[in-house]
Amino acid sequence: MQPYKLTYFNMRGRAELSRYILAYAGIPFKDQRVEWKDWPSIKPSFPLEQLPVLEVEGGLLNQSLAIARFLAKEAGLAGQGRLQEAQADAIVDSLNDFTLMIPWREEDQQLKKQKIDGLFDVHAPKLLGYLEKQLGDREWLVGDAVTWADLYWHVCSTTFSVLRPGFSDPHPRLCALLQRVGGLPGLDHWLQTRPKTEF
């Protein structure tokens, strides 16, 4: 079987969760990064003219969460049993919903800051409260083992912290979870050696 080929832009963005899963599981993959200047000429060759795309068994799989969910199942990170799989999916979707609310394409910088401030002032506390309740006194968000939901919390927190440094500080258990995820074998090496980008 040929190694997976994951194509995305030279940033963490929508592909980083899949990179985390592959790195943690020790699954070989080609981390294909597209520069913005090259994107217009190759854009038509990808499904829906979007990235990320995973090349697997000669075909192309699109949509970031579909890719990550596929890889999570391959890596044994989807959850143990149907209920845990659904619980992990719900956490991933909740984190993703918040991410999609960030006004990435707002060109007015003052308005962009106002929207981001409102997002972190109003919506972030709800999200953090939800995550803390899901975590409880356990080490991981779902069940007794790490899942892709834990990895996505780390991915999202890294980005959220750029926009609002210290946003999760009032939640020490969630901060401790970040430390556990960052220290996972395989993933710790990826975090140390991956290309450095702002987002």
Image (cartoon, helix red, strand yellow):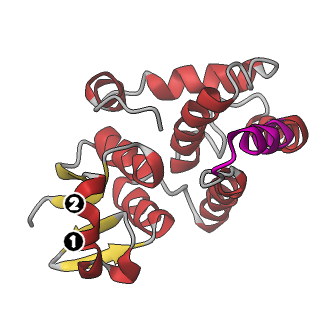
Tell which residue pokes out farthest to the left in this image. Answer: 2
Horizontal arrangement in the rendering, residue 48 relative to residue 163 (left or right) = left
The residue that disc 2 covers is 38
Q: Amino acid at mark 1?
A: Ser
Q: Amino acid at mark 2?
A: Asp
- Quadrant of the image for the N terminus? bottom left
Q: Position of residue 118 (x, y in %)?
A: 86, 41
Tell me whether circle 2 and circle 1 mark residues in contact (CB < 8 Å). yes
Give the numbered dot on residue 41.
1
Q: Position of residue 88 (x, y in %)?
A: 63, 55
Q: Residues within 10 Å of mark 2 (few under 14, many from 20)?
A: few
Displayed quadrant of residue 179: top right
Q: Which residues are magenta?
A: 107-120
Secondary structure of the residue carrying tag 2 is helix
Of 47 and 151, nearer the camera is 47
Horizontal arrangement in the rendering, residue 138 relative to residue 119 (left or right) = left
Residue sitting at 85 percent across and 45 percent down?
123
Displayed quadrant of residue 92: bottom right
Secondary structure of the magenta portion, mostly?
helix
Q: Position of residue 186 (x, y in %)?
A: 30, 31
